[in-house]
Amino acid sequence: MRIILADSYKEMSIEATKIVAGQIYLKPASVLGLATGSTPEGLYDNLVAVHKTIGLDFSQVTTFNLDEYIGMAPENPQSYHYFMHRHFFDQVNVRPENIHIPDGCAEDVPAACRAYDKLIQSKGGIDLQVLGIGRNAHIGFNEPDVKFEARTHKVRLDDETIQANARFFEEEEDVPRYAISMGIKTIMLARRVVLLASGREKAEAVRKAVCGSVSPAAPASILQLHPDATIIADRAAAAELPEDCLTGEE
């Protein structure tokens, strides 16, 4: 596991942009796994800027998003469909047919989950997966104690996750209780993984991910076993990392 320490959220986003843009330059037809939430917003802003200023080409890129709320229509401003189009897809030249996000309104959720994994496989698998991390060390919506062998599946959100996401809704009661998420196995099959972490409230989760025991109690800890995983954390998010865990680079 490689660790990159950034002095700020801005620097964290720049480091992530270098990795994602580099992936596309080296393989224009890359398959990207993408995350939502406030953490990757800076990354998407930067990728849009690189596209507009020097022509980073997304026309051959295929994307798969990690998750979506169950029961949330794509046009709902709180949906991850809406988020991705607003912050990224509508501002670059990725082809609409190459954009894939779990269907939170599927009538048969288990079938939709199986179909999502089959579609990823049909595209040759994910070349680079971008992740955030929850305060409880979840990745995607894989909450603590999820089975590591799970592929894309229906998940019940923990109370801590619901409380953290309540800031995006008028009332906490409006936060959906269920979501579709890529499973740990789906994430681990990506050839490269980049996890972004920012803010002091993520420090304990980052510590568990980097140097805690590999355990379903801290889903992100499984990344210690990934052959090509990079964590980019700002100083606040890395505040609880002991020196012997800082084996990466600054």
Image: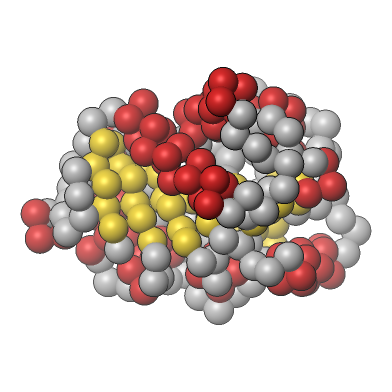
Taking the spot 79% from the left edge, 41% from the top edge, the residue there is 95
Q: Quadrant of the C terminus?
A: top left
Q: Nearer the viewer, residue 129 or 141?
A: 129
Q: Quadrant of the N terminus?
A: bottom left
Compared to 233, does 247 lie above or below? below
Taking the spot 74% from the left edge, 28% from the top edge, the residue there is 90
Taking the spot 63% from the left edge, 49% from the top edge, the residue there is 28
Q: Nearer the viewer, residue 92 or 67?
A: 92
Residue 10 point in image, percent of width and height:
36, 26
Residue 213 point in image, percent of width and height:
27, 71
Taking the spot 42% from the left edge, 51% from the top edge, the residue there is 195
Residue 134 vs residue 232: left or right? right
Residue 217 vs residue 169: left or right? left
Q: Nearer the viewer, residue 178 or 96?
A: 96
Residue 174 point in image, percent of width and height:
68, 34
Residue 124 point in image, percent of width and height:
68, 69
Give the quadrant of residue 82.
top right
Residue 155 vs residue 163: left or right? right
Give the quadrant of residue 8.
top left
Q: Nearer the viewer, residue 189 or 209?
A: 189
Examine the rendering and report whether any part of residue 179 can be seen.
no
Compared to 75, does 148 lie above or below? below
The total of numbered circles placed on residues is 0
Compared to 123, does 201 lie above or below? above
| Residue sitting farthest toward the left | 243
